[in-house]
Image (spheres, grey):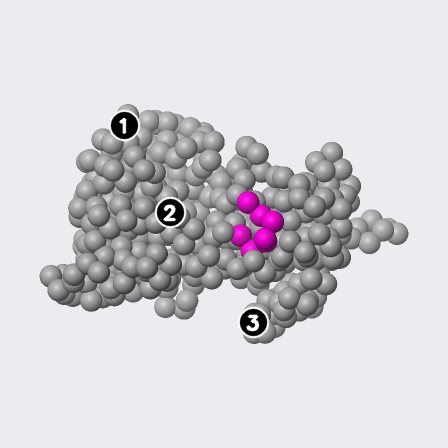
Amino acid sequence: MNIGILKEEPSIERRVALAPAGVEVLKSQGHTVFVLHQDGAGILLRDEDYQLAGATITYSSEEIINRSDIILKVSPPTDTELEVLREGQTFFSFLHLAISRRKVLERILEKKVTAIAFELIENEKGDLEVLQVMSEIAGQIAIQVGAHFLHADHGGRGTLLGSIPGIPPANVVILGAGAVGRTAARVAIGMGANVTVLDKDLNRLREMEHLFQWKITTGVATSYHIARAARFADVLIGAVLLKAEKAPHLITEAMVKEMKPGSVIIDASIDQGGCVETSRPTTIDDPVFVAHGVVHYCVPNMPAVVARTSTTALTNALLPYIQEVGEIGVVNALMKNPALAKGVCAHQGFCTNEVIGRIFDFKPKSINHLINNPATGTLI
């Protein structure tokens, strides 16, 4: 098959959908891989690195789309890219349709492409395999960011995250005990912070306490407990995830107003709309703003800060799925692999995700129904 890797907007996204190591594997299996000129320049991956791995360098996104059966991208497709897509192609990316515009989904359906969201690929254990590796990176970055913006010259309280003799450590509050929260807690403990984790799932909290040998404080994520924790937090990390849905505002503006002046919020849920009412998306180049005296870091694609590591991690998680689609075709791969099928948001002009369908008022059709009965569906 022909596989194309689209280039990202460097001021917004610095990851690449596939590293040269992944290209080499696909090339060895007989596939042709197209890479846009200087696609990896932002992370010091040269065109020569991709060429040595077997890629064909092109100079136009339109050419890549026109020549490819499978198209890979990190960020959602742009309006221009959507216009060039054609029926029968398979498009992989982080789609985040829950916070997207309706017309993006409409164009995907009109083009009759198979759109697979990285963030929804889910194995039999319920793990979001591709998203999880990015979340683990985001969790580490969250603590580094929190420590950095606590510095007085960045608008913070001038507080050290860890302790020194005679001075207690900073208080790190983590809302959510998933991959982001778990990794953030590990790094924060390692830096000597006082860590509190809130979640609605008692089993997750129990696992966290056992994992960290009771070096953390845990609490049930009720509005009462969240408000109390926010008041004493020096760093507050929002790490709330509802699969395919917009994140709820569990941290209200009133709670933010009660936080310490110069404290820091990292809203790691901002790629799904944010779990902090005062949040708004920021960029890598301009990552923070101050609201009610609190520094807000709301970069939707936090792993892009360490884009070289993230590109390798993304390749490791994504490559087996690309290999499978390349080897047996997308329909057979979806029939064979339920994890991949759960990532499909659109197929043959139909919305296939119930949550997305509800948000945009499209009646969804099961992907299993569509691939087993390709001629029976009618658009509703």
Q: Residue at x 64, y 66 (%)?
A: 223
Q: Tell me what residue is drawn at x 37 percent, y 27 percent.
A: 38
Disc 1 marks which residue? Answer: 60
* Amino acid beneath label 3: Asp
User: Which amino acid type corresponds to the residue marked 2 in the rendered image?
Assistant: Arg
Numbered marks: total: 3
- Give the residue at the far right of this rendering: 166
The relative height of residue 306 versus residue 267 in the rendered view (above or below) is above
Q: Label 3: which residue?
A: 201
Q: Position of residue 152 (x, y in %)?
A: 76, 37
Q: Which mark is residue 101?
A: 2
The image quadrant where one finds the C terminus is bottom left
Above or below residue 81? Residue 242 is: below
Can you tell which of label 3 and label 2 is closer to the viewer?
2
Q: Give the alpha-carbon distance from disc 3 to disc 2, as whole Å.
A: 32 Å
Which element is circle 2 on? loop
Q: Mark 3–mark 1 contact, CB under 8 Å? A: no
The disc, 3 or 2, on the residue closer to the chain's N-terminal end is: 2
Give the residue type at disc 1: Ser
Region of the chain picked out in magenta, as a range: 274-280
The Cα–Cα distance between marks 3 and 1, rounded to whole angstroms, is 48 Å
